[in-house]
Image (tube, rainbow, N blue to C red):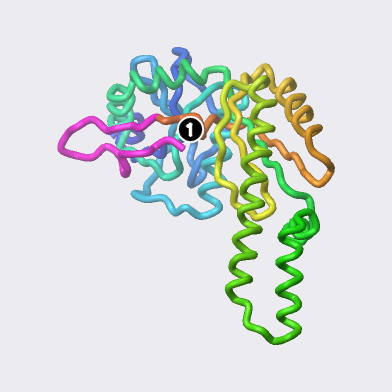
Amino acid sequence: MSTDKLRNSRAKVLYALCVSDGLKPSYQMQGLESAAVYAIDQDGLRAVVSDTASTRLRPDRRNISAHQAVLHSLTEDRTVLPMRFGVIARNAEAVEKLLIANQESIREHFERLNGRVEMGLRVSWDVANIYEFYVANHPSLRQGRDEILDRDANNIDHRDEKIRLGNLYQSLRDADRIEFTEKVKEVLFDYCEDIVETTVKREKDVMNLACLVERDKLDEFAKGVFEASKLFDNVYLFDYTGPWAPHNFITLDLHAPTDKKSTLTSVKNHTQ
């Protein structure tokens, strides 16, 4: 078997999709399992891949870091549609069929996102103890806390009061998150094309935003973050990151062509 045929027959890890410029790229990077990264083109579309002998990829730190490193390198000077970690195609022919079967959706996404990147913005309360911060700033919460402390001193059961107080704290914090997020978004929409609210994972986080920004307007976006931050005092920390591939602005739902054999290890929700 020739070298080309051997490569074509191997399974492929998929990293990203984009429109082909007709030139064969030479990527100076390694992907998962230290394999070379290269392009498979079909009908003006391109999949960025590497070969693998695995049928499934372990989602450990090393593999995920390798996948993200490839995406970061690709995003430095071009627009790509990132693939979710762990998507494997059976061989080169399966990749080509995937591009053919989804070419309309891929082109529509690329046209909408071309020349744009994702910037992340996290705003958080920069305080030692977020609960005590709310107690200090909300008399109703402070009063309830003091009443519970008095009951503690007298050995009185107060489980219901603690639950009520905890719910009050959460409702106050959640209301602030909604209000503050809208204030920031109102400013940032002058500096980016779209904003997606992503999950808040830490108790001290006010908001996590993904912002779609034109690549040549990143300096203006930074000014927008600074403008938004002036609406808040020093208790609030603004931290923005990027540029990244536009993960949160992709609704592409790839499907494999219908045949007797599955071309991918997973068919739905391939994009990140």
Helix, strand or loop: magenta stretch: loop
* Picture residue at 71% right of the left edge, 66% below the top: 144
Residue found at the very far bottom of the displayed protein = 155
| Up/down of 83 relative to 145, above or below | above
- The span picked out in magenta is 252-272
- On whether residue 221 falls in the magenta region, the answer is no
Q: Does residue 28 appear in the picture of this structure? A: no
Which residue is farthest left? 260
Q: Please, what is the three-letter code of the amino acid marked with disc 1?
A: Pro
> Which quadrant would the N terminus be assigned to in this image?
top left
The answer to whether residue 94 is left or right of residue 261 is: right
The location of residue 174, given as percent across then percent down, is 62, 49
Task: Tell me the SS state at disc 1.
Answer: strand
Res. 132 visible in picture: yes
Provide the residue designation for mark 1.
82
Look at the image and say whether residue 255 sits in the magenta stretch.
Answer: yes
The answer to which quarter of the image holds residue 45 is top left
The x and y percentages for residue 196 are 55, 33
Does residue 201 appear left or right of residue 132 in this picture? Answer: left
Q: Residue at x 55, y 36 (%)?
A: 70
Residue sitting at 44 percent across and 21 percent down? 109
Judging depth in this view, the residue of 44 and 178 nearest the camera is 178
